[in-house]
Each structure stands twice: as C-alpha cells, then as structure tokens.
Image: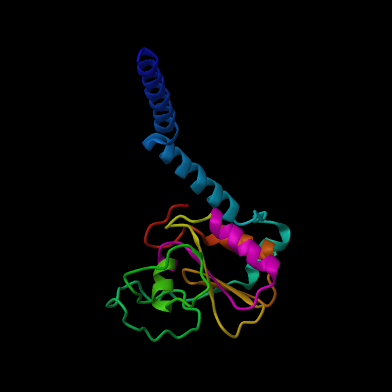
Amino acid sequence: MVEQTNSRRQSRRRTTQRFNVWTITFGPIGVTALMVTVIAFLALRNRPERVAFEPNTEAGTAALAAVQTFPDQGRQHVAPGEAVDYDSEFPTSGPHDPTPVMPGVYDEVQRPEQLVHSLEHGNIVIYYDQPEAETMKALESWADQFSGPWEGIVAVPKAGLGQEIVLTAWTKKLVMPKFDPQAAATFIDEYRGRGPENPVR
C-alpha cells in the first residue's frame, strides 16, 4: 500500500514537472517569442536583394540635364474616386484624390489621381512595363530602402513602355529609354522628400 502511494506521488511529481516545462517553453511568452522569430525570419527571407544606391555620380548628374520641368497645376483635392483629365500620361501636379498611393512596388495599375497625391507628399513615382530582371531588382531594393510616406518610392506598371522607365516627382519628369541606375538614383536623390505638402529634405 505504501509502495503504491509513493508510486502515485512520484507519478504526480513527474507529471507536474512535465507540465511546468511545457508551460515555461510553450506558455504565452514562449509562443510570443516563437511567433516573433518566425515573422522576423520570413521578413528577412522575403526582403529584396540589396542593390547599391549611387546618386550624384558624374553620369547621374549629367542625366539631370534631360529632366523636364512643368508648370505647377495646383494641389486641390477632388472628391474620392473622381477622375481628373490630366494633360499628360505621367502627370506631375494638379488636382488629385485625397488618398495617395503609399510607397512600394505594385504589379497593378494605380489611379493617376492618387499618384499625383503621392508626388505632392514628396514621393518619387516610377513607371515600368517590361523591365529587365536587374532593373526590377533595383526598383524593389530602393523602394524597400525608401519607404517613408514623405520621401518614398512608388513603382507602378504602365502598359506600352516596354523597357523604357519614366521617373516623376512634383513638376519633374525623366524618361529613360533604357534603365540607367546612376541616372535614376541621382533623380531620386535630387527630388525625393521635397514635395510641396511637407518637405522633409
């Protein structure tokens, strides 16, 4: 009888110990730590491969001579979803939607009315169609590096460009028949964060 009692006590003690180890390892804190680790791993794995951002090189600075400057056509807001008849496929100012497109690389066409608001915020809007792999890698890397709401990069598709790349800022446009990373980086560095609504650079 005594042996059975001792055996039950030892069994309960082992069960309690196993429960305590389980609680410590997989309790709320353990589960939270595990989730944070998994999320960090996925974010690191999915992060775009870094591409050097080299502005103000000799070639890049020379490319600024090709930048077009347009008259400021205003900053007023239209009703949400309302279309605006811009005088360009790549508008650089004018009436716009109250909601901007946030920085990032998009694979779906974005409304020009929202893109103009992004420019007003100081973002650079880049249009692409069928870029080479290296071009897309650069755009994704730079958009990851510059993701602030007042100084970010917005890359959006535009049918018909082929390998041509068009960069826009508030009242500015640079057309590149073929992507030139130094020219693109110099344009971005020159105008990013300098929109009329809230200049941060």
In-image side of 98 versus 132 (left or right): left
Q: Where is residue 156 in the image (x, y as percent from the top left)?
A: 52, 73
Residue at the far front: name it: 1
When the figure is inspected, residue 197 is found, relative to residue 73, above or below; the finding is above
Q: What's the residue at 43%, 32% (across, down)?
A: 22
Rendering quarter of residue 157: bottom right
Q: What's the residue at 39%, 30% (across, down)?
A: 19
In-image side of 124 versus 98 (left or right): right
Residue at the far right: name it: 59
Residue at the far left: name it: 79
In-image side of 126 versus 98 (left or right): right
Foreground residue among 4 and 74: 4
Rendering quarter of residue 120: bottom left
Q: Where is residue 14 in the image (x, y as percent from the top left)?
A: 43, 24
Foreground residue among 90 and 19: 19
Q: Position of residue 102 (x, y in %)?
A: 43, 64
When the figure is inspected, residue 192 is found, relative to residue 71, above or below; the finding is above
Q: Quadrant of the N terminus?
A: top left
Residue 31 colored in magenta in the image = no
Instruction: Report the span colored magenta.
Output: 119-145
Q: What's the residue at 35%, 17% (across, down)?
A: 5
When the figure is inspected, residue 94 is found, relative to residue 192, above or below; the finding is below
Foreground residue among 176 and 28: 28
Foreground residue among 137 and 32: 32
In-image side of 179 versus 19 (left or right): right
Q: Position of residue 194 (x, y in %)?
A: 46, 59
Residue 137 colored in magenta in the image = yes
Q: How many marks?
A: 0
Colour setting:
rainbow
